[in-house]
Amino acid sequence: MTTPVHDLFPALPRQKWKRRSCGQGAHDRRIYDRARLEVRPWHREDRRHWVLARRSVSRPEEISYYIAYCPAGTTLDELIRIAGSRWAVEECFQTAKQECG
């Protein structure tokens, strides 16, 4: 039996969460609490699977999750930067849709 990931992150100790920004948003810097857990223990030596959680600072019960498969040495800050780039990609898609009709 496995434990759902959404049950694991709320139970993490406070020191496991790191307050970080993943870049500038439309109105201000996007600052959230972040944590990661390694999943799938059968990984390759040079690769890791992670679940990255993003928790709202003002509403800590709101947690979003990302799955990452990356080189073993990837840091939490690198995962945050890459996850944050998703926002810029979505903005580009939205702009392209508006321009193409």
Image: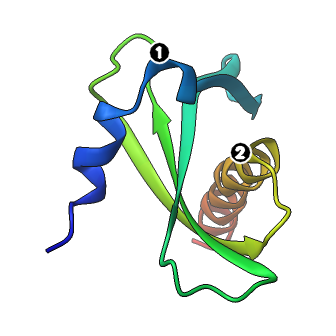
Task: Give the vertical position of 72 relative to 16 (above or below).
Answer: below
Visible residue check, residue 17: no
Indicate the quadrant containing the C terminus: top left, top right, bottom left or bottom right: bottom right
- Outermost residue on the left side: it is 1
Query: Residue 78: percent from the left, percent from the top?
Result: 82, 50
**Callout 2: 10 Å neighbours few (<14), some, many (20+)?**
many
Amino acid on which disc 2 is placed: Ile
Q: Nearer the viewer, residue 86 or 60?
A: 60
Instruction: Answer above or below: position of 97 versus 55.
Output: below
Residue at figure coordinates x 68%, y 27% from the top left? 26
Residue 89 pos. (x, y %): 71, 60
Q: Which residue is mark 1?
A: 57
In screen coordinates, is 2 left or right of 53?
Answer: left
Residue at position x 57%, y 34% from top?
34
- Quadrant in the rendering for residue 60: top left
Asked if residue 93 shows in the view, the reply is yes
Lateral position of residue 55 relative to residue 63, left or right: right
In the image, is 13 to the left or to the right of 22?
A: left
Marker count (numbered): 2
How far across and how far down the image is residue 13, in percent? Answer: 42, 25
Q: Secondary structure at mark 2?
A: helix
Q: Which residue is mark 2?
A: 80
Q: Quadrant of the N terminus?
A: bottom left
Q: Give how far apart the Cα atoms at labels 2 and 1 are.
A: 15 Å
Q: Nearer the viewer, residue 78 or 39?
A: 39
Q: Position of residue 39 (x, y in %)?
A: 48, 69
Secondary structure of the residue carrying tag 1 is loop
